[in-house]
Image (spheres, grey):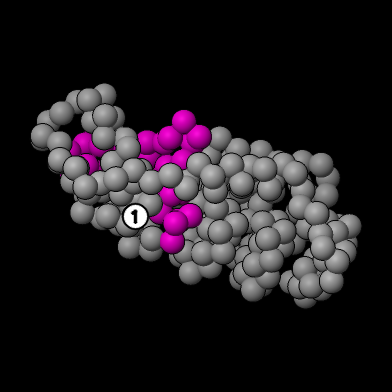
């Protein structure tokens, strides 16, 4: 199979995702907030909150939520705790955040959702968890790409039938008018091309 070039917009946004998520704040000195602190004051715990999501520290997430920390707070890049837990393969933190009401449909600054991040990273059990969330199955990022586009682009081909079964459009076109099938053909990616045909793609 030919080496296939990845579309620059998608890969650049996801590589930025990967690089920015690499740094991890230490939680060794975490001190729980006092009850009744104002939300604005609780934002001084941002580093602890996002690190707890990355590390799966449900105890710290709970302490901060119980004190009133905003569950859908985001980093400057738009990453919520649920996105971070998904990307870093933390199923217990993901379940906890979802049970407490975190919004699984929020995207980062590039529109990439938790599901897209999990697919990019290859966290397939996490991706399958997120498929049960009440989000539009064809929710698109800023480049017009969907979870199905990501599954084809990044080789997570086992997800394609499940995505289509849940209503994903295998012929969805991105912002440039390209379908996943057209992209696979252009890239010489026979494996993705054939998997998309089996999943029902026609153009």
* Residue 48 placement (x, y as % from top left): 28, 41
Q: Determine the residue positioned at 85% across, 59% down.
A: 187
* Residue 23 visible in the snapshot: yes
Quadrant of res 50: top left
* Residue 193 placement (x, y as % from top left): 82, 68
* Residue 154 placement (x, y as % from top left): 68, 61
Residue in the foreground of this view, choosing between 65 and 166: 65
Q: Relative to 13, does residue 166 appear above or below in the rendering?
A: below
* Residue 49 visible in the snapshot: no
* Residue 107 placement (x, y as % from top left): 53, 42
Q: Relative to 109, does residue 15 appear above or below in the rendering?
A: below
Drawn side of residue 13 relative to residue 91, left or right: right
- The residue under label 1 is 55
Please give the range of residues in magenta.
64-89
Quadrant showing the C terminus: bottom right
Q: Main secondary structure of the magenta part?
A: loop
Q: Determine the residue positioned at 38% across, 46% down.
A: 24
Quadrant of res 180: bottom right
Quadrant of res 122: bottom right
């Amino acid at each position: 199979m030919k080496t296939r070039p990845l579309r620059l917009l998608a890969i650049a946004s996801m590589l930025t995702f990967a690089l920015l998520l690499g740094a991890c704040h230490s939680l060794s000195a975490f001190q729980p907030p006092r009850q009744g602190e104002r939300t604005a004051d609780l934002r001084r715990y941002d580093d602890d909150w996002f690190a707890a999501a990355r590390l799966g520290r449900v105890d710290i997430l709970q302490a901060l939520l119980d004190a009133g920390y905003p569950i859908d707070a985001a980093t400057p890049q738009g990453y919520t705790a649920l996105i971070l837990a998904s990307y870093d393969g933390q199923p217990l933190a993901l379940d906890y955040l979802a049970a407490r009401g975190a919004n699984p449909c929020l995207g980062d600054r590039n529109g990439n959702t938790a599901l897209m991040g999990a697919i990019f990273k290859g966290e397939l059990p996490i991706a399958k968890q997120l498929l049960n969330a009440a989000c539009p199955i064809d929710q698109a990022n800023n480049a017009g790409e969907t979870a199905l586009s990501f599954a084809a682009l990044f080789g997570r081909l086992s997800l394609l039938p499940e995505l289509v079964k849940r209503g994903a459009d295998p012929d969805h076109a991105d912002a440039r008018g390209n379908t996943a099938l057209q992209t696979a053909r252009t890239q010489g990616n026979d494996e993705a091309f054939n998997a998309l045909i089996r999943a029902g793609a026609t153009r």
